Image (tube, rainbow, N blue to C red):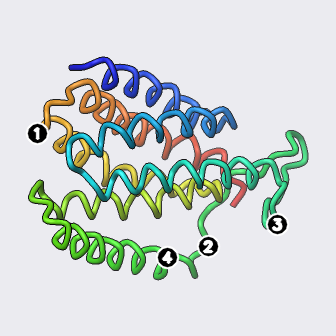
């Protein structure tokens, strides 16, 4: 383990706890986590996930604005003034699944062009799940947890295989939070 791995994992734990609580503080911690994991992923050659960290940085700003109701589509809750947790509309599911498949294939192809030899299919799939999951999180859909439920075991394997043990432990803990998050967010969902 190295210092950046430990600090990144600590920030990640703040992020996942904030996400579980549906706290808007998840967005600042997401910004920090994205910065740390951009460095970590680039250092170990996981270029798709490096790109996803850059995307996560940008979508964290977007998500904060949507959750606060500042951007169009940010339906506000009566009590908190924040967007409520909701269920993803059924009409979006074919698009979300298609986006995950297409992004996985595109990332795999791009990683092949870059000559990445470190399990490019897993890197591409985890990156695709991350893109779709973060967009769903920005919309405050409770089903965003399902995408993390699939991606976390992949990330545990990636980080264990590359010697980033603290990050692997963090993603293993995320898997537990995914299950708890599904239960909690579904219960809090307005639809």
Image x and y of residue 70, in percent = 84, 55
Circle 4 crowding by C-alpha within 10 Å: few under 14, some 14–19, many from 20? few
- Disc 3 or 4, which lies upstream in sequence? 3
Q: Which mark is residue 93?
A: 4
- Disc 2 or 3, which lies upstream in sequence? 3
Pointers 1 and 3 in contact (CB under 8 A)? no
What element does badge 2 sit on? loop
- Disc 1 or 3, which lies upstream in sequence? 3
Q: Quadrant of the C terminus?
A: bottom right
Vertical arrangement, residue 32 with respect to residue 145, above or below? above
Circle 3 crowding by C-alpha within 10 Å: few under 14, some 14–19, many from 20? few
What element does badge 3 sit on? loop
Number of numbered callouts drawn = 4
CA separation in Å, label 4 and label 1: 32 Å
Position of 11 compared to 84: left or right? left
> In the image, which is nearer the foreground, mark 1 or mark 2?
1
What element does badge 1 sit on? helix
From the viewer's side, name the closer residue of 159 and 77: 159
Residue found at x 29% / y 70%: 107
Q: Name the residue under label 3.
A: 72
């Amino acid at each position: 383990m190295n210092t950046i791995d430990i600090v990144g994992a600590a920030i990640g734990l703040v992020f996942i706890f904030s996400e579980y609580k549906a706290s808007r503080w998840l967005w600042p911690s997401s910004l920090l986590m994205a910065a740390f994991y951009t460095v970590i992923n680039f250092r170990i050659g996981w270029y798709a996930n490096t790109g996803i960290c850059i995307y996560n940085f940008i979508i964290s700003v977007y998500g904060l604005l949507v959750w606060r109701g500042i951007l169009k589509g940010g339906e506000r809750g009566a009590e908190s003034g924040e967007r409520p947790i909701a269920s993803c509309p059924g009409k979006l599911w074919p698009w979300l699944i298609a986006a995950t498949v297409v992004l996985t294939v595109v990332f795999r192809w791009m990683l092949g062009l870059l000559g990445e030899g470190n399990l490019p299919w897993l890197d591409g799939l985890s990156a695709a799940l991350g893109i779709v999951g973060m967009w769903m999180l920005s919309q405050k859909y409770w089903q965003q947890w399902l995408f993390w439920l699939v991606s976390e075991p992949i990330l545990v394997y990636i980080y264990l295989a590359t010697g980033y043990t603290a990050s692997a432990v963090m993603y293993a803990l995320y898997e537990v939070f995914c299950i708890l998050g599904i239960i909690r967010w579904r219960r809090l969902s307005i639809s």
